[in-house]
Amino acid sequence: MTVQDIYELIPEHNEISDPELKRKCAETFLDAVRRGGWEEKGGIDKCPLQVGLLADDCPASGLDHMRKVAAIATRVYDHLGEWLNTIGKCDRDVVIAGALLHDVGKLMCYTLDENGKPAKAADYAMFNHCVWGAYLAKNNGLPDSVVHIVLTHSLAQAPEGPKALITPEARIVKNSDHIAWDSVAVHWPK
C-alpha cells in the first residue's frame, strides 16, 4: 500500500489544499495500516467502527465513519468558516485533516479475531485510540493543531477529560463525530 493508494481509498484527502499537510495525513494513515497489520487483515476498510458498543454485524466500518466525519466537518466549515474567521481563526485544511485522522488510532487499538470478528488488540490496550492517533499524527509530522483534534475529539477519552482546551477546528470535528456516530449507533446498538 502506498500514499497514492490512500488517496484513492480516501478521496477526501483531495479537499486539503496544502500539499504537505495532505501528504502527511495520508502517511499517517499508511503508518497506522502498517503498524496495525491491516494489510494482512484484508485492508483498512475491515477495521471496525467500534468494539463492544455496536452490534458485531454493524455494516459501518471505521473507514466509513472517518470519511463521513470528514464530509460533515467540511460542510460545517464551508457553511460557517467565513463567519468563524471574522471572530477568530479557523483553518479549513486543519478541520479536514483532523476529521480524517480523528479515529486513526483505532487501526492500532482494534483487530479481527481468528473468526474475523471485531476485537480489541491486546498489544495496544495500554492507550486509547485518541492517544494512539495523536502519537501517529505527531510522529508523522502533522502540526499540533491537527494532533490536538485527534487527541481531544472524544473528551471522555482525552487525557485532560472534559476540561480539555478545544479549538474551533476541534469543536467542528468533535460535533461532526457525534453526528456520524449517533447516526450509526441508533440503528446498531449492542
Image (cartoon, grey):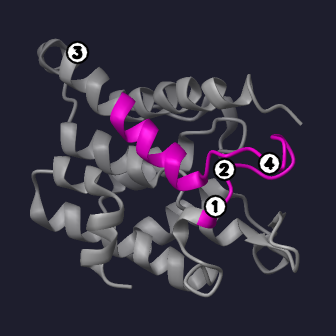
Side of 127 where 94 appears, left or right: left
Question: Residue at 32% of width from left, 51% of height from top?
Answer: 97
> Looking at the image, is mark 2 or mark 1 nearer the viewer?
2
Q: What stretch is highlighted in magenta?
A: 46-72
Residues marked 3 and 4 touching at CB (< 8 Å): no
Question: Which image quarter holds the C terminus?
Answer: top right
Residue occupied by mark 1: 106
Q: What element carries label 3?
A: helix
**Residue at point 37% right, 40% down?**
70
Amino acid under label 2? Leu
Q: Which one is in front, 39 or 69?
A: 39
Label 3 sits on residue? 80
Identify the mark nearer the N-term, 4 or 1.
4
Using a 10 Å C-alpha cutoff, classify the residue at mark 1 as few (fewer than 14 neighbours), some (14 to 19) or many (20 or more).
Answer: many
Camera-side mark, 4 or 2:
4
Disc with the residue nearer the chain's start (3 vs 4): 4
